Amino acid sequence: MSLTLYPAIDLKAGQVVRLKRGDMAQATIYNEDPGAQAADFARAGFGWVHVVDLDGAFAGRPANAAAVRAIIAAVPGLSVQLGGGIRDMATAEAWLAAGVTRIILGSAAVKDPDFARAACRAFPGRVALGIDARDGFVATEGWAETSATTATDLAQGFADSGACAIIYTDIARDGMLAGVNVAATAALARAVAIPVIASGGVASVQDIRDLRVAGAGIEGAILGRALYDGRVDPAEALALAA
């Protein structure tokens, strides 16, 4: 089976950064021009970018809107999935109208499931759930809080919601180049019919290879620090994913 690869553009104070385990104090700046970064990814052959408004995730409302709009404007044909600070219908609708292909609901799925379900119904095929887990339990508010809900329970609770994808992140591995938690990702994919996108820890093309053979239900993978640091070659990764 093929995988869709999603290079990550994490936004902090308008700049492209990578964090370690979601720690805002451990941010490495990779580019001060998010639009240029998106254009670089498009030239490399990627059809999607995975954008996270980190400040927005903590604030509970969009905080890097200008940077997101610059990404959308830089490459009109590039598909953008966006998460971070989307907590109400007006914000969801505004981003989809502005050119975002797919929005990601993370904290909202835990704290306001009625809104998350309503968004899935209102925008079929355009709402993904972001499930970020620490030791198997869902973290919210930019990973600052850990809930009592397991990742599997949350995913199964949305089985009939119409969500188009689940983006599953193992926080312990995010930004650490420790390798994807393939076993946990595959287990979640087996537990629900919603396609799962792996996030957190991709260190080499071997992770892409491992995800491809892990079984049905894993739709894609998000590439972060390994891509920025040159540990993953875009052409090689895309060829392997296809």
Image: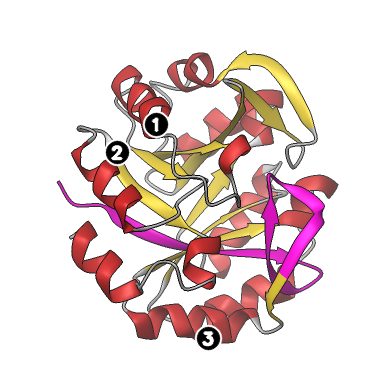
Residue 6 painted magenta? yes
Callout 1: SS: helix
Residue where numbered disc 1 is placed: 185
Specify whether 59 is left or right of 123. Answer: right
Say if residue 238 shows up in the picture. yes
Q: Position of residue 229 (x, y in %)?
A: 53, 71
The picture quadrant where one finds residue 4 is bottom left
The first of marks 1 and 3 along the sequence is 3
Specify whether 143 is left or right of 157. Answer: right
Residue 131 painted magenta? no
Query: Callout 2, which amino acid?
Result: Ile
> Which colour assignment does the render follow?
secondary structure
Identify the main secondary structure in magenta.
strand
Residue 74, labelled with which disc? Answer: 3
Residue where numbered disc 2 is placed: 218
Residue drawn at (73%, 74%), measured in percent from left and top?
15
Residue drawn at (72%, 19%), measured in percent from left and top?
147
